[in-house]
Image: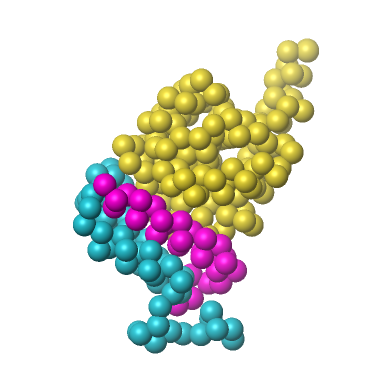
Chain colours: A cyan, B yellow
């Protein structure tokens, strides 16, 4: 098992977590879109590296949760349309 | 055989850039344009007439699921790949109902996006060949 595959303790962070947290705490609406885009890009890049792993991989699950969080921000704060049948 | 035109639709510049790089390595494809949301995609598709649209799901103004049926109405022969982080059977069902030809998870971009594009566009070539035969007979 590599370091990337090792289950994380609650105190450890993933490489993309800083960008997601920056989006979460951003208060300026003008900067928020940039923060969300940067977080999405970081998640996207990391998910490429995890492509061979199962969806049940701990980091993959954390990425899915982060994506859901970003979706909520996009919908509630950036005015993205609802994905009516999926939400 | 002419190169197939690809329209990339995603609100995230980094994702569009990566998809562009992937397709630029493929001799059978050319990037005809990029769009930032579903409405932008419809406007650009009218002029660019792409063979293939790589379509994000969640975007501002108009989502991929809302844009897909309108793209199909505008360009009935266009192939659409929904390129998304979401993965579910319900999404697959909604995508098919909206005229989307395939769903590729963003996490599988490197291994599945181009092969899926080739598979879909092979069906265009088969249809073109059949049309040519009908015209000749």
Judged left or right of residue A53, residue B56 is left
**Residue B69 visible here:** no
Residue at 23 percent across and 49 percent down: it is: A29
**Magenta highlight range:** A30-58
Q: Is residue B57 above or below residue A50?
A: above
Of residues A11 and B46, the one nearer the viewer is A11
Q: Indicate the quadrant where residue B85 lies.
A: bottom left
Q: At which x and y percent is residue B121?
A: 66, 36
Residue at 55 percent across and 84 percent down: it is: A3
Q: Is residue A37 magenta?
A: yes
Tell me the quadrant of the picture where the N terminus of chain A can be found.
bottom right
Judged left or right of residue B64, residue A45 is right
Task: Name the main secondary structure of what is drawn in magenta.
Answer: helix
Q: At which x and y percent is residue A79?
A: 24, 44
**Residue B29 visible here:** yes
Judged left or right of residue B32, residue A30 is left
Q: At which x and y percent is residue B3?
A: 70, 30
Q: Is residue B133 magenta?
A: no
Q: Is residue B68 above or below residue A87?
A: above
Residue at 53 percent across and 81 percent down: it is: A5
Tell me the quadrant of the picture where the C terminus of chain A can be found.
bottom left
Q: Is residue A79 above or below residue B85?
A: above
Residue at 27 percent across and 63 percent down: it is: A24
Number of numbered discs visible in the structure rendering: 0
Q: At which x and y percent is residue B59?
A: 36, 43
């Amino acid at each position: 098992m590599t370091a990337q595959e090792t289950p994380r303790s609650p105190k450890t962070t993933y490489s993309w977590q800083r960008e997601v947290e920056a989006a979460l705490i951003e208060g300026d609406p003008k900067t928020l879109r940039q923060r969300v885009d940067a977080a999405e890009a970081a998640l996207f890049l990391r998910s490429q590296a995890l492509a061979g792993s199962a969806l049940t991989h701990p980091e993959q699950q954390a990425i899915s949760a982060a994506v859901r969080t970003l979706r909520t921000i996009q919908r509630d704060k950036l005015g993205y349309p609802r994905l009516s049948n999926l939400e | 055989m002419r190169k197939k035109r690809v329209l990339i639709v995603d609100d995230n510049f980094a994702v569009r850039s990566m998809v562009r790089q992937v397709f630029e390595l493929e001799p059978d494809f050319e990037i005809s344009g990029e769009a930032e949301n579903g409405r932008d995609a419809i406007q650009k598709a009218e002029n660019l007439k792409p063979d293939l649209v790589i379509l994000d799901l969640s975007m501002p103004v108009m989502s991929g699921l809302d844009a897909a049926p309108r793209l199909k109405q505008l360009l009935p022969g266009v192939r659409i790949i929904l390129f998304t982080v979401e993965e579910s059977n319900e999404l697959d069902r909604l995508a098919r109902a909206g005229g989307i030809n395939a769903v590729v998870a963003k996490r599988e971009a490197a291994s599945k996006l181009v092969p899926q594009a080739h598979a879909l566009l092979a069906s265009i070539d088969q249809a073109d060949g059949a049309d040519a035969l009908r015209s000749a007979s």
